[in-house]
Structures are given as C-alpha cells and as structure tokens.
Amino acid sequence: MHTETTTIQNMSPTHPHRNAPTSVWDLFLSFNWLSLQGFGGVLGIIQRELVEKKKWLTHKEFIEDWAVAQILPGPNVINLSIMIGERHFGGRGAVAALAGMLLGPLVLVLLLSTLFAQVADLPMAQGALRGMSAAAAGLIMAAGLKLMTALKKNIMGITACALLTSATFIAVALLHQPLIRVLLGLGGLACLWTYRRILLLNKSNTHTEQQIAHHLNDHSPHQDAP
C-alpha cells in the first residue's frame, strides 16, 4: 500500500502515466547517480534511466527533447538535464540538475587523473581504456536501437524516417560533413516535411468533420418529419 501511494504521488499531474521528480534534491541525486554510471559517455545510460527506470519521459518525449538538446550550444546531456530540471522546478530545478551532472564526475576526474598519471604508461592501463571505449560505443548503439521503436508513430512516416537516418549516416560517417551543416541541411528538410504532413493531416481531419456534419444534417429529425 505504501509503495502504491508513493508511486501515485510521484506521477506527473499533466501525464498520469508518467512519473516526475519529487523535489530538487531528487533531481540532484538522480542526475548525479546518472552521470557517475555513464562516466565518459552518458548517452547509453540516460535513456535507460530517464525513460525505462524513472519514467520521467516517454520514448517519444526523450527523442524530441534529445533533438532539441543536440541543436542547442553546449554538451547534449548537460542541455537535456537543464531542460528537465527547469520543466519541473523552474530555475532551481535547472541548477540542481546541472549540479548533479557535474559535481560527482568533477571530483572523480580529479581523483582518477591523479592516480592515472602514475600508471598511464603501463600496457594494462592502455588496454583498459581501449576496452572501455568499445563498451561505450556498444551502449550508444543499444540506446539508438531502442529509440528506433518510437519512430513507428512519427508523423513523418517510417519510410521518410529511414531515408533521413540513412542520409544522416552517409553524410556524417562516410562523407565526414560537419555536424552543423548536416543539422541545417537534413534537419531543415525534415522540418519542412513534417510541416507539410501536419498541414495534410489537419486538412484531412477538417474534411472528415465536414462530411460527418453534412451526414448528420441530411438525417436530422426535421428533414424526416412530414
């Protein structure tokens, strides 16, 4: 009973099926633990923590917020933490989330840099770093594959999403185009395509409503009466 009550109290008032942080202290601790888990590469961890464990965001909301965080200047994960903190507790929440993301790793980096300087030339230490980089790449790929399931409901359509993903991969990985050029080019094209789809959807809905209203008028009791 106590667990159920706590869960209900943590739910977002605007989205009853999604949880929300209970306080700025909860924000600080959550992002601090998140940053320590994803030390050196938070992307593979942040989706699992915020979407699957804490349920502060849905898959769709995470993709939308992550897209905005990538466009804004500065580190993507820092931008996302500030956005989530500000959304729930205003400026206090933004500061708490940012402090949680930075404080723990800052202390850890200072300690590790002091220790690593003494063993940096050892083959074992260099091999450990190469192994960790491979694991970080695998975590990022796993997060990307999980997020792809949300594209089924994207208004652009699965075919357009697949073409845009392929074009982005070719531009960045094969042609080595700068990220800002890819964002402005393919991102702008995606925005125009989405805007067009929204206009067509609104037009279709309006036409359907007019057909229903016309049908109801044709079968109204006043017209059937002698």
Image (cartoon, grey):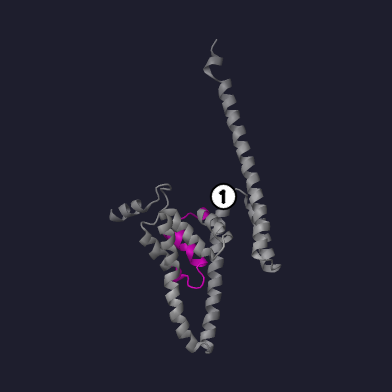
Q: How many marks?
A: 1
In x, y percent, where is residue 153?
56, 49
Q: Is residue 108 left or right of residue 212?
A: left
Q: Amino acid at mark 1?
A: Lys
In x, y percent, where is residue 55?
43, 56
| 56 part of magenta stretch | yes
**The image quarter in which residue 186 lies:** bottom right
Q: Judge by depth and name the residue closer to the eye, 110 or 5.
A: 110
Give me the residue at 42% from left, 52% from top: 18
Give me the residue at 48% from left, 57% from top: 83
Report if residue 55 is visible in the image: no
In x, y percent, where is residue 123?
54, 88
Neighbours of disc 1 within 10 Å: few (<14), some (14-19), many (20+): few
- Residue sticking out furthest to the right: 175
The quadrant of the image that shows the C terminus is: top right
In x, y percent, where is residue 150?
55, 54
Report if residue 72 is visible in the image: yes
Q: Judge by depth and name the residue closer to the eye, 96 or 12.
A: 96
Does dot 1 land on a helix, a strand or a loop?
Answer: helix
Q: Badge 1 is on which residue?
A: 153
Q: What range is drawn magenta here? A: 34-60
182 relative to 195, above or below:
below
Q: Is residue 170 left or right of residue 59?
A: right
Q: Judge by depth and name the residue closer to the eye, 95 or 77.
A: 95
| 144 part of magenta stretch | no
Q: Is residue 174 left or right of residue 29?
A: right
